[in-house]
Image (spheres, helix red, strand yellow):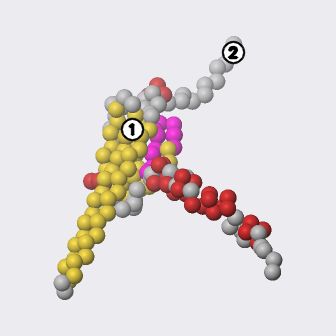
Amino acid sequence: MSLIKFNERFPWNKSVLTNFLNADDFFNDDFFAKDSLMPAMNVKENDDNFEVELAAPGFTKDDFNVTIDKNGLHISAEMEEEMEEDEEGYLRREFSYNSFKRSLRLPESINRDKEVKAIYKNGVLKLNLLKKELAKELPKKVIKIS
């Protein structure tokens, strides 16, 4: 009868098993990262405005709070749902709570005096932030030499 070394024939040698059971390594996955549960955001700069799109399905327009201050643009939302059914002596209760906060530092070219247009449709919040007149790029001018 021969003895089989544990780490030669089996892939689960001591180091792999130790790493698998190590809770710190388990929670280093990207799924548990702080920003992984944030809604996706697109920011596009045009000649006269900035367009911000935030994917936040499942919310309603009343769930959002959008503010601008000297530090930037702040978008947050909270949604709480509860459902309770009582049928034939059985009680079923479900609830969910979703929230997020996103902040962007705004450039000096944003015109904070003008109204920001915000539309929430099909799970996407769209914001339109106008630029200051001086921030718009002037067209190229050709100068004739005499």
Could you say where residue 116 lies in the image, as x and y percent from the top left?
35, 40
Which quadrant holds the N terminus? Answer: bottom right
Residue 136 as seen in the image, left or right of residue 80: right
Q: Which residue is mark 2?
A: 145
The residue drawn where x is 38% and y is 46% is 101
The residue drawn where x is 40% and y is 60% is 57
Please identify the residue farthest to the bottom as the structure is shown. 88
Secondary structure beneath disc 2? loop
Could you say where residue 47 lies in the image, as x and y percent from the top left?
51, 37
Q: Which residue is mark 1?
A: 73
Observer able to see residue 25 = yes
Assess disc 1: are there few (<14), some (14-19) or many (≥20) residues with their C-alpha within 10 Å of its C-alpha.
some
Check residue 39 for magenta coloring. no
Check residue 53 for magenta coloring. yes
Position above or below: 28 against 88: above
- Image quadrant of residue 86? bottom left
Q: Name the amino acid type tagged 1.
A: Leu
The boundaries of the magenta stretch are 44-54
Residue 97 as seen in the image, left or right of residue 144: left
Which quadrant holds the C terminus? Answer: top right
The mark that comes first in sequence, 1 or 2, is 1
> From the viewer's perspective, is the residue at label 1 or at label 2 nearer?
1
Q: Nearer the viewer, residue 121 or 97?
A: 97
Q: Name the amino acid type tagged 2.
A: Ile
Label 1, label 2: how many angstroms apart (C-alpha)? 46 Å
